[in-house]
Image (cartoon, coloured by chain):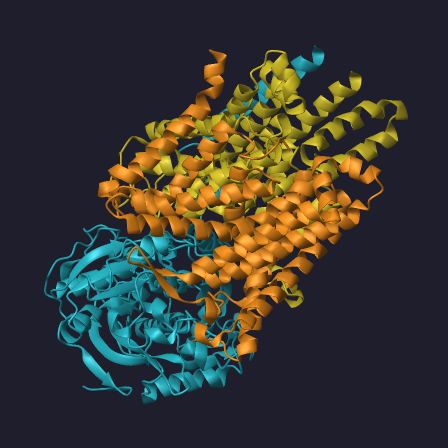
Chain colours: A cyan, B orange, C yellow
Amino acid sequence: MRNMKRPRRTTAVLAAAVMALVGCSDGGSSGLPADEGGGTIDTSEGVKLGILGQCEGPFGGFHEDTVGGTALAMVNHAGATVESATSALDGFSGAEVDGTPIELVGVGCGDDTPDRIIEEVRRLVEQLGANVIIGPLSGDEGIAVAEYAKEHPDLTVLAGISGSQEQTLQVQAPNYFRFYGDGAIWNAGLGDVLHHQEGWDDVAVIADDYSFGHTSAAGFIADFCGVGGNVTARVFPPLGTTDYSSYIAQLPGPDEVDGYFWAVGGTGTQAALEAFVNAKGDLSGDQHAGNLFFNPDLAQSLGTDIAGAYVGGFATLPGDVTTPAIEEYLASADATWETLAGGVSGNEPAPPSTAAAFGFFYGYYSAGVALVRGLEAAGGFDDPEVLHQSLSGLTLELPYGDISLDENRSGIVDVGLSRLVVDENGEVVQEAAAIIPGVDQSFGGTFSPDTPAPSRDFPACEERDLPWEGNAIEVVDGVPQE
Amino acid sequence: MTATRRRLPALVTAAVAAAAVAWVLFLAADTPAGTALDNPGTFMVTALDAVTFAGLLFVAASGFTLIFGLMRTVNMAHGSLFLLAAYVAIGVQQAMLGKTRNIEPSEVSLVDWLVPMLVGATVAALAGMVIQQVFLQWNEGQELRQALITLAITVVLADQMLREFGGLAQRMVWPGSVTHFIEIFGQRYATTRLFMLGVAVVIGVLLWLWLNKTRLGLVVRAGVDDRQMVRGLGINIRVVFAVVFFAGAFLAGVGGVLGASFSGAAPGTDGSWLLNSLVVVIIGGLGSIKGAAAGSLLYGTVVAFSPAYLPTQYSYYAIILTFGLLALVLAVRPYGLYGRPA
Amino acid sequence: MRTGSSMLNWRAASLALAVVVLAALPTVASAFFINFVMTQTLMMGLAAATIVFLAKYGGMVSLAQFLFFGVAGFMYGNAALEVGSRGLNLGLPPWTAVGFALIVTTVAAFLLGALASRTTGLYYLMLTMVYAVIGYFVFAQVTEISGPSGITSIERPDELAAPVSLYYTALALSVLAYIGFRALGRTAFGLALQGVRDDPVRMASLGFNVPLHRTLAFTLGGFVAGLGGLVNVWWNGQIDPASIGIGPTLVLLIIAVIGGVSYFEGAWLGAFVYVAMFTYLRDLPLVDRIGITEARFNTVIGVVVLLIMVLSPQGLAGIADRFRRRLSDRRRPVAETSDRSEGASHRAQSIDK
């Protein structure tokens, strides 16, 4: 019995002590160091840069690309040198803008989930002392990091290539900047081309059932319906579906619609297309269009049947467009490293320009250039607020087109649409088809801070004036026909 | 009174099944597929989808349940072996054809599919045997410890496969000789799905012959019933264990190659197929090949029918219906349809 | 008897010491260490302790604990937010939202526990893993309560506005859970539960309702995990389906395993080791020279778990326990050791069998 009583008394005492402790610590600030949280951002010793990449999850293969993009921007515009000729992950040194040093303090390793990216950004900011963040990579991560930025007004965040609308349109953190288009923007102009040039009136949409699929489909729907087309079916198979046949069965047949728009990624691109072939009929390029997942580099098994299909943009332009600025940019990547094991080359060592020509690398490159130009315009880094103001007013001259920001600090960009063609080696490649200049997030008012996030049934199919309707610049053999 | 109560779950099951059949036959007008009477073609195709997908599920789950049946090892690395075989087979097929992309089925002969399949499955089998010999052979009987060891191996393998094979989705190409399209009630149907079912049936028959008609198979079956007795008969159970683990991992590999041909391979495929295997064996009963077949059929049916026959506005919840199936089975039989208490 | 009593004194003393040290820690440690490393350690430890509770007393190794952790967070977000593009936006006062979240979590745990109550052992592990995955799909697919992007901009109650108050909340809940779980083991319910673990058939024939005991234990585990989940959602400010996906679910099991799945203190020990490894390992000088970069962190974690499971399935707490016993055995006469090693082997059962 003695044994039984003793612990009970201990229990009671301990519990009382704990309750008392909690009672006095609740609420008001206790003056402890931990109460200051991560709220203090120190900008006195130049830029401490943290990069948010992704080393696990579906985009885990692009970790090298993210750091590479920013490193190349520092090499080209801030006089930095890279630490290794074969890996971007080793970082860079010696970056400086008008006397303000830029030091890489750490690389965050996301896994495509918001929780993880919050942990990573806290580690970079609160432990390693980062005062500028470049990243993140994917959509939902962007919303979480933008919320974090909002709570830390002295922090500066330049988004990497995260595609969700909300991170700028709804969150509206004054210190969060996106120098590229969002997932909806990348499909702008497709509807114009398909409706007016290809004569599509009725379209079925099939997209992944998560935020990027919704956003990507929303961009297409807003554009296609905006110019007068009609979306007759929307099918959203859950992420991770193995057998797409039941979802393909929900699509109308090839004789019932003029075409299909696909925004299914990962293993789904091929599996869903194959299920389509199995149940509906052969693929034909004139009846299919897709978002960036139709990139033959991402979906290496995309068959030659699909040749002819229109594909949405993704930050850069296809390889057949060769302006001096693009050539110079790609050459600078090849001069900076011997090889990079980027995601597009399946993480095998490849010429660095292979990675640099792709959207993931380029988004982080654009953010790096924006940081340099912003510091130049702000004349240093003494006051983050001044930097934020100069970033908001920047127009970046970038190899794949100039980018300025709208009032929510999201990029107004030129979207490069492309077509899949079979080249002389029998390989499916992308060829530039058109450039849509000056596309912004709002799609002529379809999306605004007051509208809900893109979802399975938003936006509705409505005709409206799109600022870029009829402005498409045709690209013939890699040369824009201005 | 007690008799009624004991039979209640069975009655509920029968009622649910009858309701489901009535729904699909007569009432499902407001669904993507329509009622089976109005659209017999859609119904037939959905049923075929169910059976063919069940074939793939069976191949994937049979190795898992075989290993468990004899050794009581829950091999959490099953999905990793599945994915490893897929990656290896894709590499071999690409090497045999001399190109890595835009491979058309017409370029792929049966040999170009079978050889990579055998190589991939053998690599998975050898990897499985190494895991068994190094990590599992000396702690036999400590079931949870074994499950956690294989779980740790899964974590390592997944990370190393991401490093080795990259993050992009890859795909194995079906041989051209099985890639045709037929008409069923006016609906187009792919023979590759039937081929997949055929492979599953062949594997099922071979497994049955092995377990029922060979001496080793008899030992394995006896071992499932009573390990001590088999040991007492002077049979070297260690060799039997190694062989069964090899076979189980080989089956995981065959499943992986089929899966890679069917829907591709990428990081994450390992986890989803471990889960698929788990669902199948929980329904069917751990350790029972018969259960794996029954579980595959039931699970395949729910996967194929629920998106097609749920009311249109609810079809997003199709994937949750799997849970309903599990709940129903467990309420009636806590150890699965053909399982016994471990 | 004397041994038992001194053991308890020793335990109470070291617990009191740990609480005092942890309570005083914010005055000396850095903000990041307290608000990030230790807060996360305490709330993950709290959730992992429910795995230990179910495994140790009930013989049920549950992978669903992280689900309840998540359900509480989702429900708090649904209840507390007034506006937003996702969720129910019930707009309840924060503490009412806490109550709502805990009630929903507890009811969900009761229902799922009842469904699983006739299964044991490995079946329990697999079934609860399926629960976890289904839970993920429920929140990913049902847009009314979350949808794929989850619920963002969740704010904590005003009383907990100061960052360090989350640390103290997690500490208080952890201490209460630790004491409560230990005390529960000596109550009639706890003893019956352990009886059910060891011999369900006999307990049933003695008139105990075996499934009910398992269900109630699971419900309690879900409730406590839900408490941890509330702290988590306050700490993170957002929650989405991926937060409760298969990855984090396995991480929680790994935490319990690293610490030692039959030691309550092991839950927090394992959480600390995991969080510290996650946070600091990649900062070690030269560590990337041997191939351990942040990109291969999972390999390191996997290898550590593998080593622990190969060397000592009782985890770090088990190793520490063994070490302490060996020390005290040296000081004590041999005769007294037998009953304690029996206790140790009893503990070992929940993982070795």
Q: Position of residue B289 (x, y in %)?
A: 59, 43
Q: Quadrant of residue A160?
A: bottom left
Q: Is residue B327 left or right of residue A411?
A: right
Closer to us: A15 or B123? B123
Q: Is residue C102 visible?
A: no
Q: Is residue A405 left or right of residue A245?
A: left
Closer to us: A223 or B310? B310
For the C terminus of chain B, give its image quadrant: top right
Q: Is residue B24 above or below residue A283?
A: above
Q: Quadrant of residue C272?
A: top right
Q: Position of residue A51 (x, y in %)?
A: 45, 64
Q: Quadrant of residue A373?
A: bottom left
Q: Position of residue A416 (x, y in %)?
A: 27, 76
Rendered residue at 40%/43% (across/down): B302
Q: Position of residue C232 (x, y in %)?
A: 45, 40
Q: Is residue A114 visible?
A: yes
Q: Is residue B120 above or below residue C343?
A: below
Rendered residue at 37%/67% (across/down): A381
Rendered residue at 42%/62% (across/down): B191
